[in-house]
Image: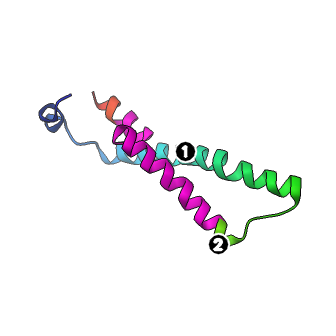
């Protein structure tokens, strides 16, 4: 779609935005589960260690930052935004 065609579309309703936000949170839960929880659980169960809280904090934000930057650089929007955009067409 061209920018002119996109500008003619109606803006999404409040509930559509809420649903897209919930979908984005569901995707982020999966990203966190795979990249954050699984390695930390493995470290805890196999070696009995846990990361310091400050390192866990930065690791979590780094994982989420990499997710958003990668999607924005790849396609200009996240997976939930792509789904929202395709549902409007």
Element assignment for label 1: helix
Residue 4 vs residue 70, the one in the foreground:
70
> For residue 60: magenta?
yes
Q: Residue at x 61, y 61 (%)?
A: 59
Q: Quadrant of residue 31?
A: top right
Task: Determine which of the numbered discs, if any, sits on residue 41 in the image.
Answer: none
Q: Quadrant of residue 51?
A: bottom right
Location of the C terminus by quadrant is top left
Q: How many marks?
A: 2
Q: Position of residue 70 (x, y in %)?
A: 45, 45
Label the magenta part by its dominant secondary structure: helix
Q: Is residue 26 left or right of residue 85?
A: right
82, above or below 36, in the image: above
Task: Determine which of the numbered discs, if any, sits on residue 54 in the image.
Answer: 2
Of discs 2 and 1, which sits in the foreground?
A: 2
35, above or below 57, in the image: above
Location of the N terminus by quadrant is top left
Q: Position of residue 53 (x, y in %)?
A: 68, 71
> For residue 72: magenta?
yes
Q: CA distance from mark 2 to mark 1?
A: 25 Å
Region rendered in magenta? 56-84
Q: Residue at x 50, y 51 (%)?
A: 66
Q: Is residue 59 left or right of residue 84?
A: right
Q: Position of residue 65 (x, y in %)?
A: 48, 55
Q: Is residue 13 left or right of residue 10?
A: right
Q: Residue at x 78, y 64 (%)?
A: 50
Q: Position of residue 71 (x, y in %)?
A: 43, 42
Q: Are marks 2 and 1 in contact (CB under 8 Å)?
A: no
- Provide the residue designation for mark 1: 26
Residue 4 vs residue 15, the one in the foreground:
4
Q: How is the image coloured?
A: rainbow
């Amino acid at each position: 779609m061209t920018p002119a065609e996109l500008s003619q579309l109606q803006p999404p309703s409040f509930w559509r935005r809420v649903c897209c936000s919930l979908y984005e949170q569901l995707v982020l839960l999966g990203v966190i589960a795979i990249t954050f929880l699984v390695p930390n659980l493995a470290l805890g169960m196999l070696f009995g260690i846990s990361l310091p809280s400050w390192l866990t904090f930065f690791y979590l934000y780094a994982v989420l930052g990499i997710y958003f930057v990668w999607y924005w650089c790849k396609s200009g929007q996240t997976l939930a935004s792509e789904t929202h955009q395709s549902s409007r067409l």
